[in-house]
Amino acid sequence: MMMLNLAASIPQEAIDVAKDGSLQSFWMPIQAAEGAAEVDFAFYFILAICAFFFFLLVGLGILFLVRYRRRPGYTPLPSPHHSWKLEAIWTGVPIVLTAFMFWFGFSSYMHSRTMPLDAHHVSVTGQKWSWSFKYEQGFEDNELHVAVGEPTVLTMRSTDVIHSFFIPAFRTKLDVVPGKYSKVWFTPTKEGVYTVFCAEYCGTEHSSMATKVVVHSKEGLAAWVQEMDDPTKNMTLVEGGKYWFDKKSCGTCHTVDGTARIGPSLKGLFGTERTLEDGSTVVADENYIRTSLLEPNKQIVAGFAPVMTPQSLDDDQIDEVIAYIKSLTN
Ligand code: HEC
Ligand SMILES: [Cu+2]
């Protein structure tokens, strides 16, 4: 397979980096999960057959056009009777080929839809415009962390519109539809960091609805879980607030540099007077920010759409976020 390093043309954070140094091929991302090789084989097999018959048929078509064209003084021979032999071949060969394609596709599809009982479980929520992952140990994060060689089952839901959960390196992709659960599973085979995309257009910031899946060693995952127990333990309040701002993907909608995006910039917000949609005003103090986070549609800032969803932050985390917003004065 031709190897190409596309690093130059792809933004750094979108590259899949396997720990063993393996690269994507010219056509395909890194194969980092069980079953990825089978998916790629099905693709190449069908591609090769299509290419073969395309050139055979178009080639013969052109050849016959030229060779048997009508020209002066040429009398066409009478059409021969049809040939049973030819017909058997052009019926039999495609049947065998398509039956193989079906068998191959069906068996790897069944494998991908049959969830193992003994697996890690992670609950995934898709919302405009970020993914969040809730772990069995009880915490939530905006990255997916899994262990190499161990199956993980994802139970996914959407809080708003249809998203699609896509990990190219695992050849895993499934729609996440509001009002129902969708499940996928995979067993990573290579430690590394790979990209997670949303593959269903879901609004303005659809293209930034990406995160990463980190494939740890078994011990690495355990260490990460321990760290997640209280990730801001050794941070100041402001640092902790910045941490949650990043982890909760607030930055998809809010900047901290004064420019409005989907939502108002949080720079210089604290202590100022806000004009709400209904014309009333309110001072942006601790209570206002707390309400903005927990019941965002209660006080809607004039000029903005009510698209912020209630944030799952506990009181300690809210203290940190408030301290961070306070620190954004100039
Ligand atoms: C999907 C986009 C989106 C996300 C994600 C989001 N917000 Fe908002 N936020 C908005 C919009 C839009 C408004 C203005 C409308 C309103 O008040 O509901 C807003 C308003 C606010 C306000 C009041 C701002 C003001 O100028 O008065 C604060 C504070 C705030 N958000 C903080 C946060 C924090 C902290 C996070 C992350 C934990 C977050 N938001 C995540 C869209 C978002
Ligand atoms: Cu999406």
Image (cartoon, rainbow, N blue to C red):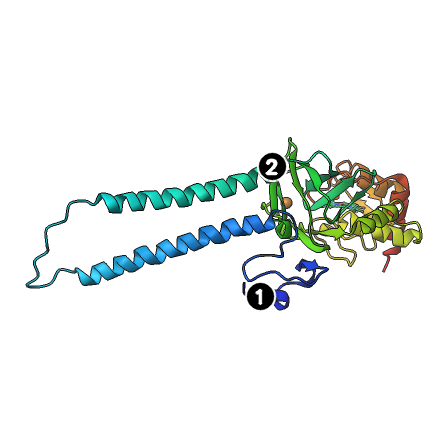
- The residue identified by callout 2 is 113
Secondary structure of the residue carrying tag 1 is: loop
> Is residue 275 among the parts visible in the rendering?
yes
Cα–Cα span, label 1 and label 2: 31 Å
User: Is the residue marked 2 within 8 Å of ligand 2, measured from its CB?
Assistant: no
Mark found first going from the N terminus, 1 or 2: 1
Is residue 125 or residue 127 the one in the foreground?
A: 125
Determine which quarter of the picture holds residue 8.
bottom right
Instruction: Tell me the quadrant of the picture where the C terminus can be found.
Output: bottom right
Coordinates of residue 316 in the picture (x, y in percent): 91, 42
Is residue 4 or residue 90 the one in the foreground?
A: 90
Is residue 117 or residue 24 the one in the foreground?
A: 117
Q: Which quarter of the frame holds ligand 1?
A: top right
Instruction: Tell me the quadrant of the picture where the N terminus can be found.
Output: bottom right
Coordinates of residue 202 in the picture (x, y in percent): 61, 44
Mark 1 is surrounded, within 10 Å at the Cα level, by few (under 14), some (14 to 19) or many (20 or more) other residues, namely few
| Apparent side of residue 318 relative to residue 301 in the rendered image (left or right) | right
| Apparent side of residue 306 relative to residue 109 in the rendered image (left or right) | right
Coordinates of residue 156 in the picture (x, y in percent): 68, 37
| The label number, if any, that marks residue 3 in the structure image | 1
Q: What residue type is labelled 1?
A: Met
Q: Which amino acid does label 2 sit on?
A: Arg
Q: Residue at x 73, y 55 (%)?
A: 191
Whether residue 3 is situated above or below residue 202 in the rendered picture: below
| Apparent side of residue 145 relative to residue 156 in the rendered image (left or right) | right
Whether residue 15 is situated above or below residue 102 in the rendered picture: below
Secondary structure of the residue carrying tag 2 is: helix
